[in-house]
Image (cartoon, helix red, strand yellow):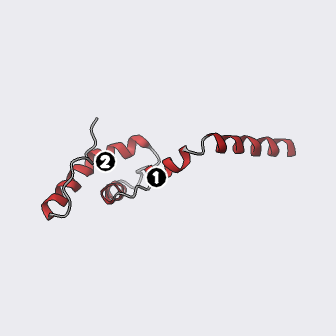
Amino acid sequence: MARLLVATLLASLVLGVVDFGAIPAWCRAMYPSDPEQKTALQLCYIENHQFNRMSAAARHDCYAKWLPILVFLDCEQGERCSSNLLVSR
């Protein structure tokens, strides 16, 4: 049992070191700092409580649905108009 535990700990350590750069990027993708992206993810969750922000495909579909609307609303309010947030396939 101890050998299995040691092997598991070593494997997780190696994977953590090898993939260290991917972990923060993955967290930033799930919890973006951009206000429109945050709002889009919240709206997707409100719309569907099964929404999985860990899935890149689910986030992409969410952004494709909500970002054009959110950017349009911001332009209407005169706060911020940027079309670079639109997700294209």
Q: Earlier in the sequence, mark 1 or mark 2?
A: 1
Q: Quadrant of residue 41?
A: bottom left
The secondary element bearing badge 2 is classed as: helix
Mark 2 neighbour density, 10 Å: few (under 14) some (14–19) many (20 or more): many
Q: Is residue 7 above or below residue 45?
A: above
Residue 43 in the image: x percent, y percent? 32, 57
Which residue is located at x 21 percent, y 48 percent?
83
Which residue is label 1 attached to?
Answer: 28
Which residue is located at x 66 percent, y 41 percent?
15
Q: Is residue 41 above or below residue 5?
A: below
Q: Nearer the viewer, residue 88 or 83?
A: 83
Which residue is label 2 attached to?
Answer: 63
Residue 13 in the image: x percent, y percent? 71, 45
Q: Quadrant of the C terminus?
A: top left
The secondary element bearing badge 1 is classed as: helix
Q: Is residue 71 above or below residue 58?
A: below
Which residue is located at x 55 percent, y 47 percent?
23
Q: Amino acid at mark 1?
A: Arg
Give the left or right position of residue 57, taking residue 84 as reference. right
Residue 51 in the image: x percent, y percent? 40, 51
Q: Quadrant of residue 35?
A: bottom left
State whether residue 53 appears in this view.
Answer: no
Residue 69: image tag: none
Residue 49 in the image: x percent, y percent? 40, 56
Mark 1 neighbour density, 10 Å: few (under 14) some (14–19) many (20 or more): few
